[in-house]
Amino acid sequence: MTSEEIDSEAQKVKKLAEFKKELEEKITEAEKNLDNLKNLLEFVDRIILESGFKRAKLPKLTPTISQVTPTSAIGKHTVALKDASGEPLADLHLNRDSMHVIIPETRTFNRNTPPFQQFLIERVLEKMREKDVEAANKGEMSHDNIFSYELVLDGDSIRKIAIKHVTPERVRELKSSIRWTLEKMYEKTKA
């Protein structure tokens, strides 16, 4: 081999080494991007779960709340709220425009256990109340019909959640949010 051929081979090896380094950098960057995307997906999943929905790839849960159509929410109904495995969490009593969540004596749910305060109270119940207050202030509804709720406690243990002025459109969201919250609280107490 002549010195020119050796130089040419060295140049090819050098270029291949540079190309290899570029590929490794692109792979590292792609792996970082993939990690970032996975973190974003996990964040979105948490937000969705906090909003009361389940990811599509989770196993489908058997219905734990009997379905009540908005028009049938006008009469009296009692619905057993259960977790995914069928464990009873609470009884939900629906009346004409009220809802009472009764926690059985066999269950203890502490009001400080997440996601009770952060999700059910702040994101669901308070938001509904605030919407009604705003609507009443605009004259769109009577101040007498503003959504309200009351907690009945034994120390920090929740015994009952009394909700007044429930519209038929809110029944399904309330049932779903309450069941999901109690299920998450129950999981934390079991752990």
Image: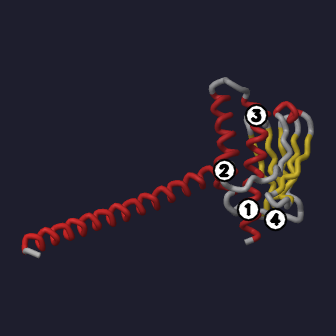
Q: Earlier in the sequence, mark 1 or mark 2?
A: 2
Quote the CA–CA distance across marks 4 and 1.
10 Å
Question: Mark 3 sits on what residue?
Answer: 169
Q: Nearer the viewer, residue 154 or 124?
A: 124
Q: Nearer the viewer, residue 133 or 177?
A: 177
Quote the CA–CA distance across marks 1 and 2.
22 Å
Residue at point 86% right, 35% down? 73
Report if the CB atoms under discs 4 and 1 are less than 8 Å apart.
Answer: no
Question: Mark 2 sits on what residue?
Answer: 56
Q: Earlier in the sequence, mark 4 or mark 1?
A: 4
Nearest to viewer (mark 1 / mark 2): 2
Label 1 SS: helix
Residue 13 in percent (x, y) is at: 21, 70
Residue 81 in percent (x, y) is at: 84, 52
Q: Quadrant of residue 99?
A: top right
Residue at point 83% right, 35% down? 69
Nearest to viewer (mark 3 / mark 2): 2
Identity, as a three-letter code, of the amino acid under mark 3: Glu
Report if the CB atoms under discs 4 and 3 are less than 8 Å apart.
Answer: no
Question: Mark 4 sits on what residue?
Answer: 108
